[in-house]
Image (cartoon, helix red, strand yellow):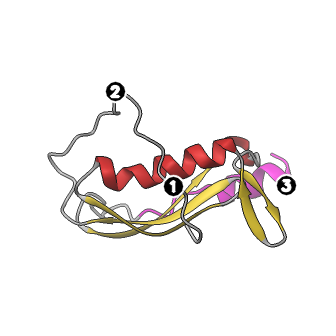
Amino acid sequence: MTKMSIKQEAHCHSLRLPEYDYSQAGAYFVTIGVQGRECVLGEIQAGAVCPSSLGEIAANSWAWLEVGYPQVSLDAWVVMPNHIHGIIVLVTDGRGGSRTAPTGAPPDPLPLTPGH
């Protein structure tokens, strides 16, 4: 194994607590990375993220979570060029809710709010 692959492997380990029930109500800090860490969600210009069309889709998909799932509330979040950081709040436990992907018509795009 090369130094680079060791470093990448170490970076990708899970920080989840093995005995913790992540379906219970609470606030969770989430990071979702793009495969291969490609910067396809936007670019940094003058110190701000300018989202690409894929970045806008990612932002709308994240914002839709609290529209599509009544047990979800969103706190601060940001789309970066190759990942999304966000605080997702489960206001009730996740047991018994839908665990399937939405199959209906896609939701209307939500306007992007500065700071999100």
Report if residue 58 lies within the magenta region: no
Residue under label 1:
111
Specify the segment rendered in magenta.
Answer: 1-16
Per the image, label 1 sits on a secondary structure element best described as: loop
Per the image, label 2 sits on a secondary structure element best described as: loop
Q: Looking at the picture, tell me which residue is in the foreground, 95 or 18.
A: 95
Tell me how far mark 1 sits from mark 3, CA to CA: 43 Å
What mark, if any, has residue 103 been given in the picture?
2
Residue under label 3:
3
Is 1 on the left-hand or right-hand side of 88? right
Is 96 on the left-hand or right-hand side of 12? left
Residue 99 lies in what quarter of the image?
top left
Residue type at the position of mark 1 = Pro
Per the image, label 3 sits on a secondary structure element best described as: helix
Residue 12, x across and y down, in percent: 63, 55
Residue 15, x across and y down, in percent: 50, 64
Relative vertical location of residue 90 with respect to residue 35 in this rendering, above or below: below
Quadrant showing the N terminus: top right
Residue at 33 percent across and 27 percent down: it is 104
Residue 34 visible within the image: no
Q: Earlier in the sequence, mark 1 or mark 3?
A: 3
Residue type at the position of mark 2 = Thr
